[in-house]
Amino acid sequence: MRRRDLLMSALAGPVRSERLERALELAAAAVASGEVTEVAIDVRQNRKRLVSTHPRRVFLLASITKPMTAAGIMILADRGRLSIDDPAGKFIPEFTGGGRDRITLRHLLTHTSGLPDMLPENIELRQRHAPLADFVAAAIRTPLLFAPGSEVRYQSMGILLLAEIAERVSGLPLREFLRKELFGPLGMKGTSLGLGGRKIAGTARSQVAEETAWDWNTPYWRDLGAPWGGAHAPAEDVTKFLDLFLYPEGRVLAPDTARSMIAINTAGLREPWGLGWMRKPGLFGKSSSEETFGHYGATGTVAWADPKTKVTCVVLTTKPASHSREGLLGPISDLVAEAVAA
């Protein structure tokens, strides 16, 4: 990716274009220095493109997958197939005992279930290329870390159980259900849970610290279809997903359902969360409004939208968020938010 390519963008509307240009310069400098292999950016306001760099390049999204899985559950809720206040055990009868009977789908959606982020057996399962069914079996029996509803603690395993519930209720593998009911209707043609039949070589390669037989770049992990982090998509498709909530027009989800997913559902607890979406002020651009929602991904990705300014921002990189959040993802988000601030 050359700096000249990055700077070829469309700037339009009442925005501070110098802030957007600075965001592009940050990305270009990171690529030119070799710090980051690839960067894609898609910024829009009122659905009009402000910045677009490599919008069709496919990246591994990591945890931006989580609100997609959550949306799958809400589609089923809209159809009356389940309620998010149902106990998880209604759909997974073997998920019982040890406080598990108190866990509802809402707890799973808001990171308040008491389940861990990753299983104690996580590395062992990945080392032996275990199928998702083995992760589910382990998650069902893993001890809770706290009483359901008593606190917020980020947990990928709750999303895994939501996926299991979606599959049992719909009768379809989650990757097929999301393709049919979410990605397809939204025109997200480049998005898939897992590889979706594409070759890894045709996607952006993550900059892993140490290559293993189960890292982010391996066929095993890329096609596992982990519902907490295994989606692949280009930046322009992620923007379409954000639009589902920024403009709740009844596509895929009922308007009230879409709005409920970005409303705070953890009042009185330490962290504000919607249903699958983060709602922490300042996390997605320091100048963004308190209504802003979004999500980060460990592979070096971020996607957010501000209902007040009607801006969407998607930044996909190949550098893990643990090393790119402070130096790239955060600063770019800050500049975008400043560019459109009222």
Image (cartoon, rainbow, N blue to C red):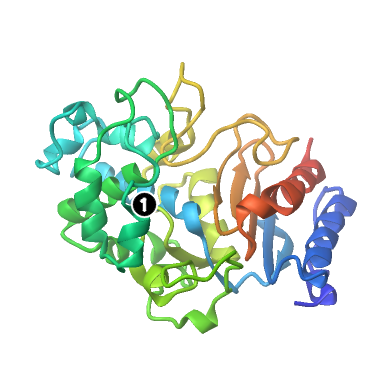
Residue 23 is left or right of residue 96, and the answer is: right
**Residue 239, quarter of picture:** bottom right
Q: Position of residue 229 (x, y in %)?
A: 43, 56
**Residue 141, quarter of picture:** top left
Residue 341 is left or right of residue 69, and the answer is: right
**Residue, far right:** 18
| Residue at 64% across, 62% down | 319
Q: Position of residue 77 (x, y in %)?
A: 26, 42
| Residue at 61% across, 38% down | 307
Whether residue 227 appears in this view of the structure is: no
Quadrant of image for the N terminus: bottom right
Instruction: Look at the picture and state if 129 lies above or below 73.
Output: below
**Residue 107, quarter of picture:** top left
Residue 335 is left or right of residue 243, and the answer is: right
Q: Position of residue 70 (x, y in %)?
A: 37, 46
Of residues 306 and 93, which is closer to you in this image?
93
| Residue at 80% across, 47% down | 335
| Residue at 84% across, 65% down | 29
Residue hosting label 1: 69
Instruction: Look at the picture and state if 161 lies above or below 114.
Output: below
Label 1 CA crowd tier, 10 Å (few <14, some 14–19, many 20+): many
Mark 1: amino acid: Thr
Whether residue 218 appears in this view of the structure is: yes
**Residue, far left:** 93
Of residues 125 and 104, which is closer to you in this image?
125
Of residues 98 and 233, which is closer to you in this image?
98
